[in-house]
Amino acid sequence: MADMVDLVLGIAAAVGASTLYSLGIALQALDAREAPPEEHLRLALVGRLLRRARWLLGTGLSVLGWPLQVVALLLAPLVVVQPALAAGLLVLLLFGERMLGERAGRYEHLATLAIVVGVVGAAVFAPPRSASERGEHLTITLVLVGLALASLLPYLLRALGRSFAAVTMICAGLAYGWSAVATKLASDDLSTHHLLLAALWALSTAAASAVGVLSEMSALQARPAIQVAPVVFVTQTVVPVALAPALFGESFAATPLGGVPLGLSLAVLVAGAALLARSPLLTALMEGGAPLMEGEVVSHPSGSAPNPEDPSHATMRSNPSTDAGDPSSATTSTSPARIGR
C-alpha cells in the first residue's frame, strides 16, 4: 500500500513538473521564432533570448519544474515518471482554450484519453523503484557520453556548413533524454545521501538541458511547433524508458504478464502525447496566434525569422514531405484536429 501511495505521489509530482515545463517552453517558443535566422544553433541566440523577459519567465518556470521531477523520481521509477511528463500537455491544452477562446475537438479528446489511460496503466503495472540496482559504471558512462555526443551533432553539422531541421529536433530530444537520465542518477544519489555526487549530476542535467533548449529553440526557428514538439517529446520519452532496464534495473519482465501491459500503456501514452502535441490549440499558443483552418497559410510576422534553410517565408501546417536541408521545400502541416470539429 505504501508503495502505491509513493507511486501516486510520484506521478503527481511528475504532472506538476510537466505543467511547469510545458508552460515554460510555450513562452520560450514565442521569442525563439522572432530571432534572426543567422543565430540558428549559435550562442548568440541564447544571448538574445536572455534579454527577453518573456523567455526568462519561461526559463524560470522550467527551472522550477526540475525539483518536482527529482521528487517524482525519488518516489516512482523512471519508466513511469518520464512518460507521465506528458500530462503537462493537458494543462497546456486547457490554457490554450482559455487564451484563444477555442474548444478542443474530437482529436484532442482522443489524445487526452490516450494520455490518461497510459498514465493509469503505467501506474498499475509499474516495476518497483530501486536506487541500488544501477548498471555498471562503465555502461552508464558510455551511455551518457553517447547521448552527449549525439545531441551535439547539429553543432558539428553547422560547423561543416550543413543544417537539417529533422536532425536538430531529434538531437534536442536526445539532449533532454540525457538530462532525464542524469536527473534519475541525481535522485538516486540524493536518496542514498551522496550529496556531492547528486550535485554533480545536477550540473550535468543543467548542461544537457542547455544544449536541449538551444537545439529546440533553433528547431522552432526552422519549423513550426506542430512539427517540432512531437519529435522532441517522443525522443526524450522513449530514450530514457528504453535505457531504464539496463541502467537502473527497471525491468519490464518483472511486471505482470512479462511487461506486455506496461509496454502497451506506455505506447498508448506516448502516441497520445505525440498527437496532442500536434494540436492546433497548442501550436497556436506556442506561435502566438489563432489555430488555422486546414490548408490555411501563415506568413511570418514582421521581424520574425523565416526558416533559415528555406527561402520561403510562408508556413503551412501539414506533415512535411521534405527535410529542412532541402532549400526548395516549404514547411507544411495539415491539422487533423480540424476534421470533425
Image: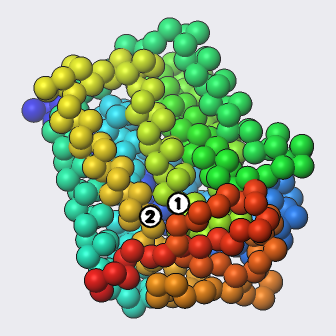
What element does badge 1 sit on? helix
Residue 7 seen in the figure: no
Looking at the image, the residue that sits furthest to the bottom is 101
Say which of 328 and 152 sits in front. Answer: 328
**Residue annotated with mark 2:** 277
- Locate residue 133 relative to residue 135 in the image: left or right: left
- Quarter of the view holding residue 265: top left
Quarter the N terminus occupies: top left
Q: Residue at x 48, y 35 (%)?
A: 239
Tell me: 309 left or right of 329. Answer: right
Q: Earlier in the sequence, mark 1 or mark 2?
A: 1
Vertical relation: 228 (above or below) 335: above
Circles 1 and 2: CB atoms closer than 8 Å: yes
Give me the disc on residue 259: none
Residue at image position (55%, 13%) is 139
Q: Quadrant of residue 127?
A: top left
User: In this picture, is 319 found above or below 257?
Assistant: below
Residue bearing mark 1: 229
